Amino acid sequence: MRIIALSTLKAFREGNSAHSDAIEPTLAWYRHALKADWASPTAIKEDFRNASILKDGRVVFNIAGNKYRLAVWINYAYRVVYIRFIGTHAQYDKINVQTI
């Protein structure tokens, strides 16, 4: 997969020392996604059982033992993952994942 907006992950990890525990889990997710070939939501569920598949190509991954949420939009045909949001559950609850 091609991953767009890696800077969103970097800014989250490096922008707040309280999120330093997200460094390794986000890198692990990134490395896995880079090698993946997600042609459909089913392929994602095979790799990440706890991923939430939403409508219109949106997917939410639980990061660092479900401490953080990573929301992405996936263009399955072109194998592109667009990182739209990463944050705590409280931050996630304040957004509309379908519009970010």
Image (tube, grey):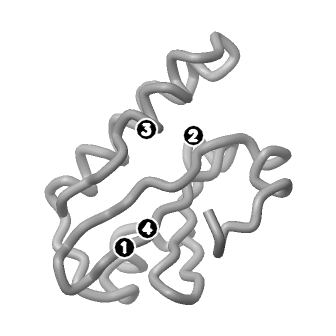
Q: Which residue is mark 1?
A: 74
For the residues labelled 3 and 2, say whether their Cβ atoms are less than 8 Å apart: yes
**SS for dot 4:** loop
Q: CA distance from mark 4 to mark 3?
A: 14 Å
Q: Which residue is mark 4?
A: 48
Q: Which of the 4 quarters of the picture holds residue 6? A: top left
Residue at the (30%, 78%) spot, across then down: 75
Q: CA distance from mark 1 to mark 3?
A: 17 Å
Cβ atoms at labels 4 and 3 below 8 Å apart: no
Which part of the image, by quadrant, shows the N terminus? bottom left
Mark whose residue sits in front, 3 or 2: 3
Residue shown at the point (46%, 38%) measured from the top left: 8
Q: Which mark is residue 86?
A: none
Instruction: Identify the amino acid type marked 4.
Output: Phe
**Viewer-proximal residue among 60 and 57:** 57
Q: Nearer the viewer, mark 1 or mark 4?
A: 1
Q: Secondary structure at mark 1?
A: strand
Circles 2 and 4, Cβ within 8 Å, touching? The answer is no
Tell whether 63 sits left or right of 97. left
Q: Nearer the viewer, residue 82 or 43?
A: 82
CB atoms at circles 2 and 1 under 8 Å apart? no
Earlier-in-chain disc, 2 versus 4: 4
Spatial separation of the CA atoms under disc 3 and disc 2: 8 Å
Confirm or deny contact between disc 1 and disc 3 (CB under 8 A): no
Q: Residue furthest top?
A: 17
Query: Mark 2 or mark 1: which is in front?
Result: 1
Q: Depth check: 5 or 33 in front?
A: 5
Q: Position of residue 12 (x, y in %)?
A: 55, 29
